[in-house]
Image (spheres, rainbow, N blue to C red):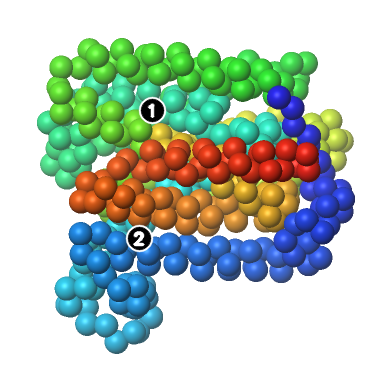
Amino acid sequence: MSSTALSPVKGLARRNSTFLLSGLGVLPRLVVVCSVLAVLLFAAMVFAASTGPTTIPAADVANAILQYIGIDRGVDVHAPVYRIVTVVRLPGLMVAALVGAAFACAGATMQGLFRNPLADPGIIGVSAGASLGVVLVITQFAALDNLWLLNNGPLSNALWRIPAGAFIGAVISSTLVYVLSLQRGRVNIAALLLAGIALNSVLGAFTSALLLRTSNYDAVHAILSWLVGSLEGRGWDYFHLAKWPIIVSIGLLLLYTRDLNLLVIGEENAQSLGVNVAQIRLVLLVLSSLITASAVSIAGAIGFVGLIVPHILRLVIGPDNRILLPASVIGGAAFLVFADAVARSVIAPEQLPVGIVTALIGGPFFLFLLWRNRRSIAAF
């Protein structure tokens, strides 16, 4: 499997007619793209909040959300509709948006870092490492009656162990994959993917062994649902648990978009242009691992968000990470909010784990894109 890394500038010049708004400067393109994606995110939030056991008209949902964020729409804040939207449904949607933004940003960063459009936290083992860290913490450091009872459950005094375990597992797995993929100081793409596949299998085996040794059936059932990737029952507690690691890490990654562009054209070229390649690689690896671990710690290993969202956006707006990374953040949020709405409505009143929905949506669509553009895609 091969991939071609093109300069963000030269790549745009060669395919000037392909990428959206390629004739504009970086800042105007960034404003337009992010504005369009923000509208899509708001539409996804309205659609998701309008679905459920009680169907609410989209206009009422939109007015309730706008009223909640401080835009006066004349909505009675004591009305049942407002309470359902803002108290019952909005917290879960905010968690979905946060997790989707995290996975998409981590995926876009790893694709640029490894110069491979198929790099993804799930594929190269980072999510599996974070999952193993969380399962290890849960099964070895706490006997749970209710896995996600945060306020007065067994983990209430040691909740920090969950994201800490996820982060340690993610960093170790991403570092191991990166080291195994190095060949004469450069990342070997085939070795990267093979190492990721092998590591996923090994870490999955350890996770299964821990589950088999756990006698608490309720905890095992909840962990299995979480490993697939689920947003069921997630509220403000989960959002506040992960918001600062994710938001701060995304903000820091946005500061490195120029360096990420230079890494895409080759490490030697980047070094000659004044980039400290070793330092930048370490920083990007740690930040993307922290984002992934934070998302996994509250929602499980949801797949395909970090793979398909940056890939589709790259095909539409081009490979310039100064635009691609912010767009991936908003696009990933919108994608997972929409997927969560589908998960809650397909077999209502039951709810599918959202990880199943993202795989069913992302897998076939991604394969279709690869087949349709198999001759014209120049990877980066």
Residue of label 1:
131
Q: Quadrant of residue 131?
A: top left
Residue at 68%, 49% in the rendered image: 314
User: Label 2 sits on what residue type?
Assistant: Ala
> How many C-alpha atoms fall within 10 Å of the one at disc 1: few (<14), some, or many (≥20)?
many
Image coordinates for residue 195, horizontal then vertical, percent: 58, 17
Q: Position of residue 104 (x, y in %)?
A: 53, 45
Q: Quadrant of the C terminus?
A: top right
Q: Would you say residue 279 is visible in this rendering?
A: no
Q: As drawn, is 9 to the left or to the right of 96?
A: right
Where is residue 25? Give x, y as percent.
78, 65
Q: Dot 2 lies on which element?
A: helix
Distance, label 1 to label 2, CA atoms, is 27 Å
Residue 165 coordinates in the image, percent (x, y): 37, 28
Q: Which residue is mark 2?
A: 48
Residue 340 vs 355, above or below: the answer is below
Q: Nearer the viewer, residue 219 or 40?
A: 40
Q: Is label 1 in a helix, a strand or a loop?
A: helix
Residue 300: name its quadrant.
top left
Foreground residue, 232 or 176?
232
Q: Is residue 20 visible?
A: yes
